[in-house]
Each structure stands twice: as structure tokens, then as C-alpha cells.
Amino acid sequence: MSARRPSIVLITMAVILVAAAAVVRLVVAPNATKLPADTDQTVHYAGETTMLDVKALRSGDTAHVLRSGIPVTADRRVRVTSTQGDTAVIEDTMTVRAGEQSSPSSKTYAVDRASRKGVPPPASTSAENSRGALSSAFPPDAEQDDSYTYYDATTRSIVPVRYTGTARREGREVNVYEIKVSAAVKDPAVSKPLPTALPKKLFASLVPALDAKTRARLTPTVLAALPDPVPLTYLGQSTLVAYVDQRTGIAVDQTVSRRTVATTSVDGAPTPLLPVSVVTLQVTPESVQDLGDKATSAGRLLTALTVLAPLAMVAGAAVLLLATFMLSRRRRAADEVTL
């Protein structure tokens, strides 16, 4: 066997380790950050709601048109139903329960598995038009700026996402993002149960219950000029605050406030009247803990793939090269003694 054979073997092994480190860092790690095909996560919320009492409205009982302070719970399930290359189809279902009433709402999105932004859906798949915007999740290592947009399914609009700073949740560093929406309701599932018009007499009976600014605008002259029945449209207003794990993109905590406001046109301008639905929700402590645990586990895996494993391989290659150098020195020293 050649005296140089061990050195060649060691150098070859070092090169293989460096190549493996590059593959893990540049190929395996990025794939690990993609939205998994088996994603299926349920988050629980609790809060309260104000609801329109349709029976009271129809009977003219204006004092009891709105029922407020009703405790609610909600379950949100986000699951990947299929993948095609870098595109994942997501089913995002929110079920809100108030007393014996249950209101499920399900939306389908097509998202890029890396950026989590909306993309065109695969052929024969129907999805919300959320292209270029976030809808159900943030990406890992999310940017700490205002570069993201968000798709709101109730209004079918895309709005800015505002980065407001950092915080801690469950021992994890999180980015805090705020999303505000105010646009016409376009989701039929929200608008269909609501009245499209009110008899003018019933509408007039509601005026004393409105805020001072609206009452001042609805003078007797203005009321007299309104059509009978008075047509109604609806405004969707939302504020969402997400506490997103910096490493994994998991939203460890969230607060949600949603309002549906009845409006009508006065002198050609839309005029808000009163909220017909208000829901405020926050992730339950149990879900916050569960999400924090998932972020910790996922964060350890990402750190292992992106930092620890490549470093260990490069360190191993360095040791092998050092051993090669030491063998070379010993061989030269032996050659000198022989001479």
C-alpha cells in the first residue's frame, strides 16, 4: 500500500463531509422550512360577542335589537389537503359557538409552501384569490418590517400587515404584527343571513339607538327622503394581532376583533349605522402553551439542520485535514531520518 494512501482517504472523507454540510444547509434545511404536506393544526379561542336579534328587529323591539356580552368559543383548524410541487392547498375552517348556536366558516387557499403567500391554485381546484398575500400562516424567519400583505376573506380584500415590534410568548421571541381591515362585506356566507333592507318606519325607530354623529345626520328631512324600504349594505371591520415565533413562523398567540356594521347611503355617501355583529377572541392559554411547545420543537429541528449539523460536518472535515497534515509531517520526518 502506498504511504500516501491514508492521506488520500482522509482528504476524500473531508471533501465528502464539506459537500454533505453544503447539501444539508442549502437543500435539506430549506426543504424543512416548507409547509409540511401533513399539516393539520387546531387552535382554540375564547371571547365574547354582540349579536343582532333578528326577532327583536322584526318586532320593532329596538331596545333589545343587540344582545351583547355573550360568551363565545371558537376552533380554527388549518390543514393541508393536497400539495403539488411547491404549492399547498389549505383548508382553513373557523367554527364559532355562542350558546347553542354554531357558525362554521371554511375557506380554501393555495399558497407557496416556502413563503406562505397566495399563488394560483392547481387545475380544477377552487380557492380564494389571495395571490401574493398571507392568509393562514407566516413563513419561518419572517421579516421584521411592513413588507407583508394579508388577504381578508370576509371583504375579499388585501391589506397591509404592520410590524409593531417584538415580545415574548412561552419563552420564545416573537414578532408582533397588526392587521386592520375596513371594507365592504363580499363573502355571501356573512351577508346572506342579514337583511338587505328595512321598512322606513322600522328604520326610523332605530335612529335613537344610533351614535350621536349618525343621529345628527339622519334629520327628519333626510329620513323623509330615504326610499322605503331603506336599503342596507355591510362593512367588515377587523383588527388582528399575531405574535409570530421568529424562528418557525408559528403564531404562538393571537387576538381577533371582527365587526360587521350595517350601512346605508345618505345623500350619496355611505353612512355607518350600527354593528350587527361584534366578535372578540383570544387564543386560550392551553393553546398558547401547545403552540409554544410546537415552536420550541420545530425551532430545535431547524437549528440542528441549519447550524449544528453543517458545523459538525465542517468541524469533522477540519479534523480530518489536520490528521492529514500530521501524517504528512510524520512521513517527512521519517524520510529525513532514513536519509
Image: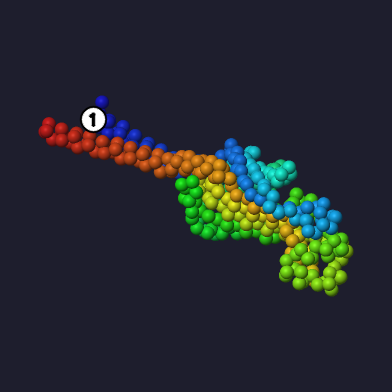
Out of 176 and 54, give the one closest to the viewer.
54
Q: What element carries label 1?
A: loop
Q: Looking at this rendering, what residue extends furthest in the bottom direction?
A: 221
Residue drawn at x 71%, y 44% as measured from the top left: 99
User: In the rendered view, does 84 fall on the left or right side of 260?
Assistant: left
Q: What residue type is labelled 1?
A: Ala
Q: In which quarter of the image is residue 317?
A: top left
Residue drawn at x 49%, y 54% as measured from the top left: 167
Residue drawn at x 74%, y 53% as measured from the top left: 67
Q: Quadrant of residue 80?
A: top right
Where residue 83 appears, as percent x and y from the top left, is: 62, 40
Report the quarter where the N terminus lies: top left
Where residue 246 appears, as percent x and y from the top left, is: 49, 50
Q: Can residue 185 be seen in this view?
A: no
Report the quarter where the C terminus lies: top left
The residue carrying mark 1 is 3
Q: Can residue 164 be seen in this view?
A: yes
- The answer to whether 10 is drawn above or below residue 109 in the figure is above
Where residue 289 appears, as percent x and y from the top left, is: 52, 43
Out of 9 and 251, give the one closest to the viewer.
251
Residue drawn at x 53%, y 50% as measured from the top left: 244
Where residue 72 appears, as percent x and y from the top left, is: 67, 47
User: In the rendered view, does 211 fall on the left or right side of 285?
Assistant: right
Q: Looking at this rendering, what residue extends furthest in the front direction?
A: 63
- Colouring of the image: rainbow
Query: Could you classify mark 1 by the number of other residues whose Cα lies within 10 Å: few (under 14), some (14-19), or many (20 or more)?
Result: few
